[in-house]
Amino acid sequence: MNDQPGAGVELYELFPSVRQTYQDIAEWTGIEVRRIFEEERKPGEEHRQGVGAVRQAAAVLGIADVLAEEYGIRPVSVCGLSFGALVAAALAGSVAREDLFTLLIRLRDVPPPPDGPPQGVAMLRIPYDTDPGALLADIADVHLSADLGRVGTSTERMVLLGGYRTALEAFGATLPTGALHISEDHGAAFHSPLQRHVRDFLGPTIEAMPFKDPRIPVHSCMEREAITTGEGIRRLFQRNPTDPVSVPHMIGGLEDHGTELGLVLGPAALGTFQNASFPVVHVESPDHVFEAMTAVYDFGIDLPHDETGTE
Protein backbone atom coordinates (compact mmCIF):
# COMPACT_ATOMS: atom_id res chain seq x y z
CA MET A 1 0.00 0.00 0.00
CA ASN A 2 1.15 3.50 -0.83
CA ASP A 3 -1.40 5.84 0.70
CA GLN A 4 0.59 8.97 1.46
CA PRO A 5 -1.47 12.13 2.09
CA GLY A 6 -1.78 14.34 -0.97
CA ALA A 7 -2.20 11.59 -3.54
CA GLY A 8 -4.50 12.81 -6.31
CA VAL A 9 -4.54 16.51 -5.36
CA GLU A 10 -3.06 17.83 -8.62
CA LEU A 11 -5.54 15.93 -10.76
CA TYR A 12 -8.41 17.01 -8.50
CA GLU A 13 -7.49 20.66 -8.97
CA LEU A 14 -7.11 20.36 -12.74
CA PHE A 15 -9.93 18.10 -13.95
CA PRO A 16 -13.69 18.52 -13.24
CA SER A 17 -14.23 14.78 -13.79
CA VAL A 18 -11.89 14.00 -10.89
CA ARG A 19 -13.63 16.53 -8.63
CA GLN A 20 -16.92 14.79 -9.36
CA THR A 21 -15.40 11.40 -8.58
CA TYR A 22 -14.19 12.62 -5.19
CA GLN A 23 -17.48 14.32 -4.40
CA ASP A 24 -19.30 11.06 -5.07
CA ILE A 25 -16.87 9.18 -2.84
CA ALA A 26 -17.31 11.72 -0.05
CA GLU A 27 -21.09 11.19 -0.19
CA TRP A 28 -20.77 7.40 -0.13
CA THR A 29 -18.27 7.28 2.72
CA GLY A 30 -19.21 10.28 4.82
CA ILE A 31 -15.55 11.38 4.67
CA GLU A 32 -15.17 14.90 3.34
CA VAL A 33 -12.79 15.43 0.42
CA ARG A 34 -10.27 17.37 2.49
CA ARG A 35 -9.93 14.46 4.92
CA ILE A 36 -9.48 11.99 2.05
CA PHE A 37 -6.49 13.99 0.86
CA GLU A 38 -4.96 15.04 4.16
CA GLU A 39 -5.64 12.54 6.93
CA GLU A 40 -2.57 10.61 8.07
CA ARG A 41 -2.52 7.16 9.55
CA LYS A 42 -2.32 7.19 13.32
CA PRO A 43 0.61 5.41 15.03
CA GLY A 44 -0.08 1.70 15.23
CA GLU A 45 -3.13 1.97 12.98
CA GLU A 46 -3.53 -0.69 10.28
CA HIS A 47 -4.11 0.48 6.72
CA ARG A 48 -7.71 -0.74 6.67
CA GLN A 49 -8.54 1.24 9.81
CA GLY A 50 -7.71 4.66 8.37
CA VAL A 51 -8.58 6.75 5.34
CA GLY A 52 -5.69 5.34 3.31
CA ALA A 53 -7.67 2.67 1.47
CA VAL A 54 -10.30 5.24 0.47
CA ARG A 55 -7.59 7.69 -0.62
CA GLN A 56 -5.79 5.14 -2.79
CA ALA A 57 -8.96 3.82 -4.42
CA ALA A 58 -10.15 7.37 -5.08
CA ALA A 59 -6.86 8.27 -6.77
CA VAL A 60 -7.01 5.23 -9.07
CA LEU A 61 -10.62 5.80 -10.08
CA GLY A 62 -10.07 9.53 -10.59
CA ILE A 63 -7.14 8.87 -12.93
CA ALA A 64 -9.12 6.26 -14.84
CA ASP A 65 -11.94 8.78 -15.30
CA VAL A 66 -9.53 11.42 -16.64
CA LEU A 67 -8.02 8.98 -19.12
CA ALA A 68 -11.42 7.78 -20.33
CA GLU A 69 -13.49 10.96 -20.30
CA GLU A 70 -10.87 13.48 -21.34
CA TYR A 71 -8.71 11.43 -23.71
CA GLY A 72 -10.67 8.32 -24.70
CA ILE A 73 -8.08 5.97 -23.17
CA ARG A 74 -9.91 2.94 -21.79
CA PRO A 75 -8.56 -0.46 -20.72
CA VAL A 76 -9.19 -3.70 -22.56
CA SER A 77 -8.35 -5.64 -19.39
CA VAL A 78 -7.44 -4.78 -15.79
CA CYS A 79 -5.65 -6.28 -12.82
CA GLY A 80 -4.61 -5.38 -9.33
CA LEU A 81 -2.58 -6.87 -6.53
CA SER A 82 -4.24 -7.45 -3.17
CA PHE A 83 -6.39 -4.38 -2.39
CA GLY A 84 -5.81 -3.24 -5.98
CA ALA A 85 -7.73 -6.25 -7.26
CA LEU A 86 -10.90 -4.91 -5.62
CA VAL A 87 -10.45 -1.54 -7.30
CA ALA A 88 -9.76 -3.26 -10.62
CA ALA A 89 -13.10 -5.05 -10.33
CA ALA A 90 -14.81 -1.67 -9.97
CA LEU A 91 -12.97 -0.35 -13.03
CA ALA A 92 -14.23 -3.37 -14.95
CA GLY A 93 -17.82 -2.65 -13.91
CA SER A 94 -18.26 -5.88 -11.95
CA VAL A 95 -18.96 -4.09 -8.68
CA ALA A 96 -20.58 -0.67 -8.30
CA ARG A 97 -18.26 2.01 -7.00
CA GLU A 98 -20.63 2.86 -4.18
CA ASP A 99 -20.60 -0.79 -3.07
CA LEU A 100 -16.80 -0.87 -3.20
CA PHE A 101 -16.48 2.16 -0.94
CA THR A 102 -19.17 0.84 1.39
CA LEU A 103 -17.00 -2.26 1.79
CA LEU A 104 -13.88 -0.17 2.40
CA ILE A 105 -15.67 1.70 5.18
CA ARG A 106 -16.81 -1.66 6.58
CA LEU A 107 -13.13 -2.65 6.85
CA ARG A 108 -12.70 -0.03 9.55
CA ASP A 109 -15.02 -2.03 11.82
CA VAL A 110 -13.13 -5.34 11.56
CA PRO A 111 -12.60 -6.61 15.11
CA PRO A 112 -9.13 -7.53 16.34
CA PRO A 113 -8.00 -11.12 15.74
CA PRO A 114 -8.78 -13.76 18.34
CA ASP A 115 -6.43 -13.85 21.28
CA GLY A 116 -3.03 -15.10 20.25
CA PRO A 117 0.57 -14.05 19.73
CA PRO A 118 1.22 -10.81 17.83
CA GLN A 119 1.25 -11.13 14.06
CA GLY A 120 3.81 -9.81 11.61
CA VAL A 121 4.98 -9.56 8.02
CA ALA A 122 8.47 -10.34 6.73
CA MET A 123 10.37 -10.01 3.46
CA LEU A 124 12.73 -12.66 2.10
CA ARG A 125 14.75 -13.18 -1.07
CA ILE A 126 15.01 -16.78 -2.28
CA PRO A 127 16.51 -18.40 -5.41
CA TYR A 128 14.10 -17.90 -8.28
CA ASP A 129 13.65 -21.62 -8.92
CA THR A 130 12.73 -22.29 -5.27
CA ASP A 131 9.08 -23.12 -4.61
CA PRO A 132 8.00 -20.78 -1.77
CA GLY A 133 5.32 -23.22 -0.68
CA ALA A 134 7.81 -26.06 -0.37
CA LEU A 135 10.20 -23.81 1.55
CA LEU A 136 7.55 -23.18 4.20
CA ALA A 137 5.93 -26.61 4.19
CA ASP A 138 7.32 -27.63 7.58
CA ILE A 139 7.38 -24.18 9.19
CA ALA A 140 4.55 -23.80 11.69
CA ASP A 141 2.61 -20.52 11.78
CA VAL A 142 4.54 -18.94 8.87
CA HIS A 143 2.66 -18.55 5.57
CA LEU A 144 3.35 -17.25 2.09
CA SER A 145 1.53 -13.92 1.72
CA ALA A 146 2.84 -12.68 -1.62
CA ASP A 147 5.20 -13.70 -4.41
CA LEU A 148 6.56 -10.43 -5.81
CA GLY A 149 8.53 -12.12 -8.60
CA ARG A 150 12.05 -11.62 -9.90
CA VAL A 151 14.34 -9.07 -8.27
CA GLY A 152 17.93 -7.97 -8.61
CA THR A 153 19.73 -9.85 -11.36
CA SER A 154 16.61 -12.00 -11.88
CA THR A 155 18.20 -15.00 -10.19
CA GLU A 156 16.13 -14.38 -7.04
CA ARG A 157 12.51 -13.73 -6.20
CA MET A 158 11.10 -11.63 -3.38
CA VAL A 159 8.41 -13.13 -1.18
CA LEU A 160 6.39 -11.70 1.69
CA LEU A 161 5.61 -13.97 4.61
CA GLY A 162 2.86 -13.59 7.18
CA GLY A 163 2.65 -15.30 10.52
CA TYR A 164 2.99 -15.03 14.25
CA ARG A 165 5.91 -12.75 15.01
CA THR A 166 7.59 -15.32 17.25
CA ALA A 167 7.34 -17.91 14.47
CA LEU A 168 8.83 -15.46 11.94
CA GLU A 169 11.70 -14.72 14.32
CA ALA A 170 12.34 -18.43 14.87
CA PHE A 171 12.34 -19.05 11.11
CA GLY A 172 14.68 -16.10 10.57
CA ALA A 173 17.11 -17.58 13.07
CA THR A 174 17.55 -20.60 10.78
CA LEU A 175 18.59 -18.37 7.86
CA PRO A 176 21.76 -16.37 7.23
CA THR A 177 21.94 -13.26 9.42
CA GLY A 178 19.81 -10.44 8.03
CA ALA A 179 18.15 -12.57 5.34
CA LEU A 180 14.66 -12.19 6.80
CA HIS A 181 13.43 -8.62 7.31
CA ILE A 182 10.46 -8.36 9.68
CA SER A 183 8.42 -5.21 9.15
CA GLU A 184 7.97 -2.79 12.01
CA ASP A 185 5.03 -1.10 10.27
CA HIS A 186 2.61 -4.01 9.81
CA GLY A 187 0.99 -5.92 12.64
CA ALA A 188 -1.38 -8.05 10.56
CA ALA A 189 -0.34 -11.20 8.69
CA PHE A 190 -2.27 -10.21 5.58
CA HIS A 191 -3.07 -12.79 2.89
CA SER A 192 -2.67 -15.63 5.35
CA PRO A 193 -4.96 -17.94 7.34
CA LEU A 194 -4.35 -15.72 10.38
CA GLN A 195 -6.69 -13.18 8.77
CA ARG A 196 -9.64 -15.56 8.78
CA HIS A 197 -11.46 -13.25 11.19
CA VAL A 198 -11.42 -10.52 8.51
CA ARG A 199 -12.84 -12.90 5.92
CA ASP A 200 -15.57 -14.05 8.31
CA PHE A 201 -16.48 -10.47 9.29
CA LEU A 202 -16.78 -9.28 5.68
CA GLY A 203 -18.47 -12.46 4.49
CA PRO A 204 -22.12 -11.38 4.92
CA THR A 205 -21.44 -7.97 3.31
CA ILE A 206 -19.73 -9.53 0.28
CA GLU A 207 -22.41 -12.19 -0.06
CA ALA A 208 -25.08 -9.48 -0.17
CA MET A 209 -23.24 -7.36 -2.74
CA PRO A 210 -24.41 -7.58 -6.37
CA PHE A 211 -21.62 -8.62 -8.74
CA LYS A 212 -22.00 -8.37 -12.52
CA ASP A 213 -19.94 -10.08 -15.17
CA PRO A 214 -17.08 -7.62 -15.80
CA ARG A 215 -17.16 -5.67 -19.07
CA ILE A 216 -13.50 -6.57 -19.60
CA PRO A 217 -11.37 -9.40 -18.17
CA VAL A 218 -10.00 -8.99 -14.64
CA HIS A 219 -6.67 -10.80 -14.41
CA SER A 220 -6.39 -12.60 -11.09
CA CYS A 221 -3.53 -12.05 -8.67
CA MET A 222 -4.17 -15.48 -7.13
CA GLU A 223 -4.04 -17.71 -10.20
CA ARG A 224 -2.85 -17.15 -13.74
CA GLU A 225 -6.31 -16.66 -15.18
CA ALA A 226 -8.74 -14.04 -16.41
CA ILE A 227 -11.93 -13.68 -14.37
CA THR A 228 -14.94 -13.05 -16.59
CA THR A 229 -17.94 -13.75 -14.34
CA GLY A 230 -19.53 -11.90 -11.46
CA GLU A 231 -19.33 -14.96 -9.24
CA GLY A 232 -15.62 -15.24 -10.01
CA ILE A 233 -15.15 -11.66 -8.84
CA ARG A 234 -17.17 -12.39 -5.69
CA ARG A 235 -14.81 -15.27 -4.89
CA LEU A 236 -11.85 -12.93 -5.44
CA PHE A 237 -13.31 -10.53 -2.84
CA GLN A 238 -14.00 -13.38 -0.42
CA ARG A 239 -10.51 -14.86 -0.70
CA ASN A 240 -8.59 -11.58 -0.61
CA PRO A 241 -7.92 -11.43 3.16
CA THR A 242 -6.60 -14.98 3.53
CA ASP A 243 -5.12 -16.23 0.23
CA PRO A 244 -1.60 -15.49 -1.06
CA VAL A 245 -1.19 -13.19 -4.06
CA SER A 246 1.32 -13.35 -6.89
CA VAL A 247 2.82 -10.74 -9.19
CA PRO A 248 4.00 -13.43 -11.67
CA HIS A 249 0.45 -14.81 -11.91
CA MET A 250 -0.94 -11.33 -12.53
CA ILE A 251 1.65 -10.31 -15.14
CA GLY A 252 1.48 -13.72 -16.77
CA GLY A 253 -2.25 -13.30 -17.24
CA LEU A 254 -1.73 -9.93 -18.89
CA GLU A 255 0.90 -11.43 -21.20
CA ASP A 256 -1.45 -14.29 -22.10
CA HIS A 257 -4.03 -11.65 -23.05
CA GLY A 258 -1.60 -10.04 -25.50
CA THR A 259 -1.13 -6.81 -23.54
CA GLU A 260 0.62 -4.15 -25.63
CA LEU A 261 0.89 -1.35 -23.04
CA GLY A 262 0.30 -1.25 -19.30
CA LEU A 263 -0.84 1.84 -17.41
CA VAL A 264 -0.17 1.66 -13.68
CA LEU A 265 -2.69 3.98 -12.04
CA GLY A 266 -2.16 5.94 -8.84
CA PRO A 267 0.32 5.49 -6.00
CA ALA A 268 2.11 2.23 -6.74
CA ALA A 269 5.23 0.17 -6.19
CA LEU A 270 6.72 0.71 -9.64
CA GLY A 271 9.04 -2.28 -9.47
CA THR A 272 6.02 -4.57 -9.63
CA PHE A 273 6.04 -4.57 -13.44
CA GLN A 274 9.79 -4.36 -14.04
CA ASN A 275 9.89 -7.84 -15.58
CA ALA A 276 6.79 -7.54 -17.77
CA SER A 277 7.27 -8.23 -21.48
CA PHE A 278 5.23 -5.12 -22.40
CA PRO A 279 6.02 -1.42 -21.79
CA VAL A 280 4.54 0.22 -18.70
CA VAL A 281 3.71 3.88 -17.95
CA HIS A 282 3.00 5.11 -14.43
CA VAL A 283 0.08 7.57 -14.24
CA GLU A 284 -0.30 9.55 -11.02
CA SER A 285 0.01 13.24 -11.94
CA PRO A 286 -1.12 15.53 -14.80
CA ASP A 287 2.31 15.17 -16.43
CA HIS A 288 1.92 11.40 -16.33
CA VAL A 289 -1.44 11.67 -18.12
CA PHE A 290 0.25 13.30 -21.08
CA GLU A 291 3.02 10.68 -20.98
CA ALA A 292 0.33 7.99 -21.19
CA MET A 293 -1.25 9.71 -24.19
CA THR A 294 2.14 9.89 -25.89
CA ALA A 295 2.82 6.21 -25.21
CA VAL A 296 -0.55 5.17 -26.65
CA TYR A 297 0.23 6.93 -29.91
CA ASP A 298 3.93 6.02 -29.99
CA PHE A 299 3.13 2.33 -29.68
CA GLY A 300 0.27 2.53 -32.17
CA ILE A 301 -2.35 1.31 -29.70
CA ASP A 302 -5.91 1.25 -31.05
CA LEU A 303 -8.15 2.96 -28.53
CA PRO A 304 -11.14 0.83 -27.48
CA HIS A 305 -14.60 2.24 -28.13
CA ASP A 306 -17.09 3.10 -25.41
CA GLU A 307 -20.71 1.95 -25.38
CA THR A 308 -21.76 4.74 -27.75
CA GLY A 309 -19.26 3.64 -30.40
CA THR A 310 -17.09 6.74 -30.10
CA GLU A 311 -13.44 6.90 -29.05
Image (cartoon, grey):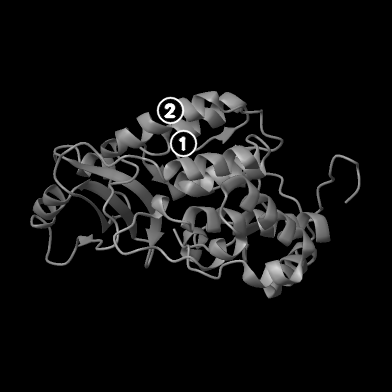
Q: For the residue marked with disc 1, what is the amino acid?
A: Glu
Query: What x and y, as percent, mark residue 121?
Result: 26, 53
Residue at the farthest bottom position: 287
Q: Nearer the viewer, residue 290 or 128?
A: 290
What is the secondary structure assignment of the residue under circle 1?
Answer: loop
What is the secondary structure assignment of the residue under circle 2?
Answer: helix
Label 1 crowd (10 A; few <14 / some 14-19 / many >=20): some
Q: In the drawing, does residue 26 fall left or right of residue 107?
A: right
Q: Is residue 247 above or below residue 43?
A: above
Q: Residue at x 31, y 39 (%)?
A: 111
Residue 47 is at least partly visible in this image: yes
Q: In the drawing, does residue 192 fall left or right of residue 291?
A: left
Q: Which of 302 and 50 is in front in this view?
A: 50
Query: What x and y, as percent, mark residue 183?
Result: 25, 61
Q: In the drawing, does residue 42 fall left or right of residue 22?
A: left
Whether label 2 touches label 1, CB < 8 Å: no
> Which residue is the site of mark 2?
203
> Which residue is the site of mark 1?
223
Query: What x and y, as percent, mark residue 21?
Result: 70, 54
Q: Residue at x 28, y 35 (%)?
A: 193
Query: What x and y, as percent, mark residue 37?
Result: 56, 66
Q: Nearer the viewer, residue 160 or 302?
A: 160
Residue 254 is at least partly visible in this image: no
